[in-house]
Image (spheres, rainbow, N blue to C red):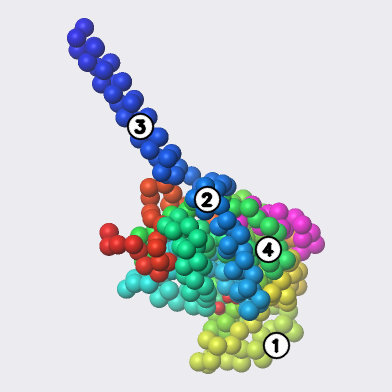
């Protein structure tokens, strides 16, 4: 009987400890999930502050939205959306050649400084990247996408991981679907997220291999091919400087990308592949004629991309400076 009482007492003690721990987590904002009202009490104007800064960045440089959208994809693709791409260290992800052309890291750092003044130690660099990307979509004519917040920043990064997880331009449709299925996307969302290529440009260095292949089996539109050859004359060193727009309206977030790839005017292998694969072709054709449908699928895909594999609660930290971890771990 006595031992039974002791067991009961122990169980009560454990329940109390678990409850106290739970309460602590709640009060410290340590919820383990992203939330739509995450900064309501700790930084209520975070979205307005980011939006205001973004507008002035976009006014100064119309190519900026493309940069922020790609930055989000490349952050989320390696270790999840944790601002690992911003870390400046021996192992920086930016050393990886697949991150060639990634821009505007310093603008995220500048936004962070502004937010440190408004709400010290609250807003993670990972959330700033996600907000910058969704404002980029909106201000170039795309949908307004509400995203949950509360991502924490990583305390490490690895260029090897970037090498392993960033996709190359020659991936096939199977590999593409695999990448986005892993983030919970269905077929439509996987085709929609590649619609990010409605913005921005690709450098010739990423195009020439396809363009000057001896047996170009691609059904590339001949006039488009000629235009690409004029834009990227040969395999020269200046290929790192010259570039070609991703679609015919590279500063507008629209469904032009799908209309282009249907007509054989896709810039990279993967762009033309989704227009020809039997699984993805029908969706590409639908997006090409129905922009609203594309916007809807892109919006839900964007939430999944930016929520996949995030650090929350006590995992990770809110960096004080986006390019450095707070202290050595
Ligand atoms: C999964 C397969 C993908 C591949 C292989 C791929 C590949 C590329 C390449 C090679 C470039 C050109 C980089 C340069 O030469 O400067 C590029 C640009 C771009 N990508 Fe992707 N991408 C993929 C998916 C995505 C996704 C999911 C998004 C966003 C949702 C995205 C958004 C962009 C944007 C906006 C640019 C233009 C960047 C700029 O102008 O600065 N890409 N992509
Ligand atoms: Ca990352
Ligand atoms: Ca466009």
How packed mark 4 is, by other alpha carbons closer than 10 Å (few <14, some 14-19, many 20 or more), is some
**Of tags 2 and 4, which is closer to the observer?**
2
Determine the residue positioned at 66% across, 85% down.
Answer: 228
Q: Mark 2 to mark 4: distance in Å? A: 21 Å
Which quadrant of the rendered structure holds the C terminus? bottom left
The numbered mark, 2 or 4, whose residue comes first in the sequence reads: 2
Determine the residue positioned at 38% across, 47% down.
Answer: 314
The numbered mark, 1 or 2, whose residue comes first in the sequence reads: 2
- Toward the front, the furthest residue is 117
The numbered mark, 4 or 3, whose residue comes first in the sequence reads: 3
Residue 324 visible in this rendered orientation of the protein: yes
Determine the residue positioned at 61% across, 69% down.
Answer: 54
Q: Of helix, strand and loop, which one carries label 4?
A: helix
Q: Badges 2 and 4: C-beta atoms under 8 Å apart? A: no
308 and 194: which one is in front?
A: 308
The numbered mark, 2 or 3, whose residue comes first in the sequence reads: 3
- Residue assigned mark 3: 20
The magenta stretch is 288-304
Q: Mark 4 to mark 3: distance in Å? A: 42 Å
Q: Mark 1 to mark 4: distance in Å? A: 33 Å
């Amino acid at each position: 009987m006595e031992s039974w009482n002791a067991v009961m007492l122990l169980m009560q003690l454990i329940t109390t400890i678990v409850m106290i721990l739970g309460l602590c987590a709640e009060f410290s904002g340590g919820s383990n999930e992203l939330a739509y009202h995450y900064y309501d009490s700790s930084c209520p104007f975070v979205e307005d502050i980011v939006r205001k800064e973004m507008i002035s960045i976009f006014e100064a440089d119309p190519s900026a939205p493309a940069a922020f959208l790609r930055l989000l994809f490349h952050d989320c693709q390696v270790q999840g959306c944790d601002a690992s791409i911003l870390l400046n260290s021996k192992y920086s992800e930016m050393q990886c050649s697949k991150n060639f052309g990634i821009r505007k890291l310093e603008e995220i750092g500048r936004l962070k400084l502004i937010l440190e003044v408004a709400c010290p130690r609250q807003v993670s660099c990972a959330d700033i990247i996600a907000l910058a990307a969704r404002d980029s979509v909106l201000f170039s004519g795309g949908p307004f996408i509400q995203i949950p917040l509360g991502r924490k920043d990583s305390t490490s990064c690895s260029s090897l991981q970037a090498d392993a997880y960033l996709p190359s331009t020659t991936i096939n449709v199977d590999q593409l679907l695999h990448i986005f299925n892993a983030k919970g996307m269905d077929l439509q969302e996987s085709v929609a997220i590649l619609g990010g290529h409605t913005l921005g440009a690709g450098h010739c260095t990423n195009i020439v291999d396809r363009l000057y292949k001896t047996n170009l089996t691609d059904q590339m539109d001949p006039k488009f091919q000629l235009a690409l050859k004029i834009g990227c004359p040969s395999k020269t060193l200046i290929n790192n400087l010259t570039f070609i727009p991703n679609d015919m309206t590279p500063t507008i977030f629209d469904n032009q990308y799908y209309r282009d790839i249907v007509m054989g005017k896709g810039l990279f292998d993967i762009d033309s592949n989704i227009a020809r694969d039997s699984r993805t072709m029908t969706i590409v054709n639908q997006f090409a004629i129905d922009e609203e449908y594309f916007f809807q699928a892109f919006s839900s895909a964007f939430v999944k991309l930016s929520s996949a594999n995030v650090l929350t609660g006590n995992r990770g930290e809110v960096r004080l400076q986006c390019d450095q971890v707070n202290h050595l771990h």
